[in-house]
Amino acid sequence: MPSHSNRLINETSPYLLQHAHNPVDWYPWGEEALEKARAEDKPILVSIGYAACHWCHVMEKESFEDEATAQLMNAHFINIKIDREERPDLDHIYMDAVQAMTGSGGWPLNVFLLPNAKPFYGGTYFPPEPAFNKPSWKNVLQGIAGSYKEKRDQIESQANQLIGHLEQANGFGIYAVTTAPAGLFTKETAESMCINLLKTADTVEGGFGGLLNFHKHFR
């Protein structure tokens, strides 16, 4: 029998279920996790991946299955796991943010947020020990936790500047994704979202370009 189970155990996504027995206290994206972050005034770690992602599995085995690393994550962060195939909207938002911060992106996508869900730091794969010109995952966690306590004003300013940059570079708008009123995703709104998404499609190289309008997501 697994020695740990977290809140992902009740999810249906195969990717999320792969993490359901990590010692990390993972939450799925939703109001429970966001409210806990606000109530405890803790930063949020959002980790996004998908079932076929090689480096997602590598980071899980190296860090998310490690008891000492999990204790560090649980003590200082509200930890949210997202399946990018289940929530491409959130993946797009936070991928745009990490690409704006670092100039590159990929999966696993690990992004740190204020309790109001504004991103302020992020990256992709982090090794368990410094390597590949990257800090270790533990060093990242410790650095973020310390900065959140000691340099909160700077972090909030950085997050607001990032959101402002992304708004200016906006390609199209989205609805708020933290909570969705009943009837929001009607046939008409779904068609409108599809049309807006297709406007950003690269029909030559593939994929999607442009940055999301963060204003509605974070106001």
Image (cartoon, helix red, strand yellow):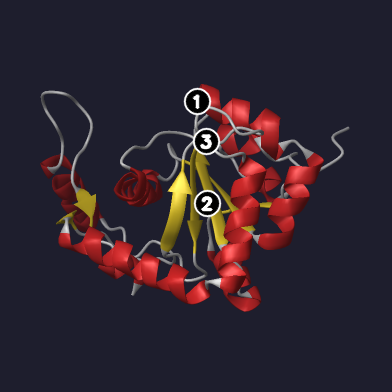
In contact (CB < 8 Å): disc 2 and disc 3 = no
Calculate the distance from the C-alpha at mark 1 to the C-alpha at mark 2. Answer: 16 Å
In the picture, the disc for residue 46 is 2
Q: Can residue 181 be seen?
A: no
> Picture coordinates of residue 209 (x, y %)?
19, 40
* Between marks 3 and 1 in the image, the one whose residue lies nearer the viewer: 3
Which residue type does callout 3 highlight?
A: Lys
Which residue type does callout 2 highlight?
A: Val
Q: Does 96 sit above or below residue 41?
A: above
At 62% from the left and 39% from the top, the residue drawn is 136
At 61% from the left and 71% from the top, the residue drawn is 149
- Tag 1, which secondary structure? loop
* Between marks 2 and 3 in the image, the one whose residue lies nearer the viewer: 3
Badge 3, how many Cα within 10 Å: few under 14, some, many 20+? Answer: some
Badge 1, how many Cα within 10 Å: few under 14, some, many 20+? Answer: few
Mark with earlier residue (3, 1): 1
Which residue type does callout 1 highlight?
A: Cys
| Mark 3 lies on residue | 134
Calculate the distance from the C-alpha at mark 2 to the C-alpha at mark 3. Answer: 19 Å
At 62% from the left and 44% from the top, the residue drawn is 11
177 or 139, nearer to the observer: 139
Q: Does 16 sit above or below residue 73?
A: above
Calculate the distance from the C-alpha at mark 3 to the C-alpha at mark 1. Answer: 20 Å
In contact (CB < 8 Å): disc 3 and disc 1 = no
At 15% from the left and 42% from the top, the residue drawn is 200
- Tag 2, which secondary structure? strand
Q: Is residue 74 left or right of residue 84?
A: right
- Tag 3, which secondary structure? loop
In contact (CB < 8 Å): disc 1 and disc 2 = no
| Mark 1 lies on residue | 53
